[in-house]
Amino acid sequence: MSYSNASPGARDRAKGIAGVVAIHALIGAGVVTGLSITGVIEEEDKGIAAIFTPRPQDPPPPPPPTDAADPMVDPPVSPPPSAPRPPIDLVVKNPIDVVPATPSLPQPTVRIPMPNPGPTVRVAPPAPAVTPMPTATFTPTSPSPSNGPAGWITNSDYSASDIRRGNEGTARYRLVIGSDGRVDACEIVSGTGHASLDRDTCRLIERRARFDAARDASGERVVGTYTGSVTWRIPE
């Protein structure tokens, strides 16, 4: 029994040694050929399998720069200097004599006197026409009685009631005379103290009094005023 167990162990060790040698050989070959191992190595009873992927090649190196001072490059050859040319003699036919110009003399400045225009005369515009005011050809006058104040009120105008009561007194009045000479209004300025006598005074004057109307400065008839008084006294 011991011999049969030792024989299989020796075969397994021989397989392992052969597999290791084969792996190292493949790795060495991959390094030499520039391959990189990217696969999976499986160990089976029948042998060892390996998968390899080629490694990309590096780009070629750039060419070395060209140096102008490279001793291997021949320097540029300059052309030989040209031989000097002989001078050329120019022959001038019929030379022209140049006469210098005579400088011109300055001309005197002539000043023409300008005529004196004289002082400027400004004409004033004509003054606007003024309409003259009419001169007074008539002296203004106030109204004046044309039939006399004495006939406006008489003793016969005394009323029986005023005589019986003994009413007496003086009435002062103010009249407004129109341009036609008639009394337009009557106002008692100072009464007699009896309303009946004051009322009869204005009533009788407005009915009987006539006037020459007042006149203005041009002689036209205008409205005016007139003042007077009447004394009422009972006859004996």
Image (tube, grey):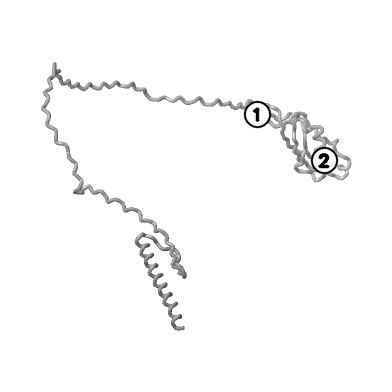
Q: Residue at x 36, y 56 (%)?
A: 58
Identify residue for label 2. 199
How many numbered callouts?
A: 2
Number of the front mark, 1 or 2:
1
Q: Position of residue 211 (x, y in %)?
A: 75, 30
Q: Residues within 10 Å of mark 2 (few under 14, many from 20)?
A: some
Nearest to the observer: residue 90 or residue 127: 90
Residue found at the far top of this picture: 94
Q: What distance separates the C-alpha of mark 1 from that of mark 2? A: 36 Å
Q: Position of residue 111 (x, y in %)?
A: 28, 22
- Residue 34 placement, left or right of 82: right
Q: Look at the numbered disc 1 and give the secondary structure of its residue.
A: loop
Q: Residues within 10 Å of mark 1 (few under 14, many from 20)?
A: some
Label for residue 217? 1
Q: Residue at x 43, y 80 (%)?
A: 6
Nearest to the observer: residue 138 or residue 135: 135
Residue 59 against residue 177 in the figure, above or below: below
Three-letter residue code for mark 1: Ala
Q: Residue at x 12, y 20 (%)?
A: 91
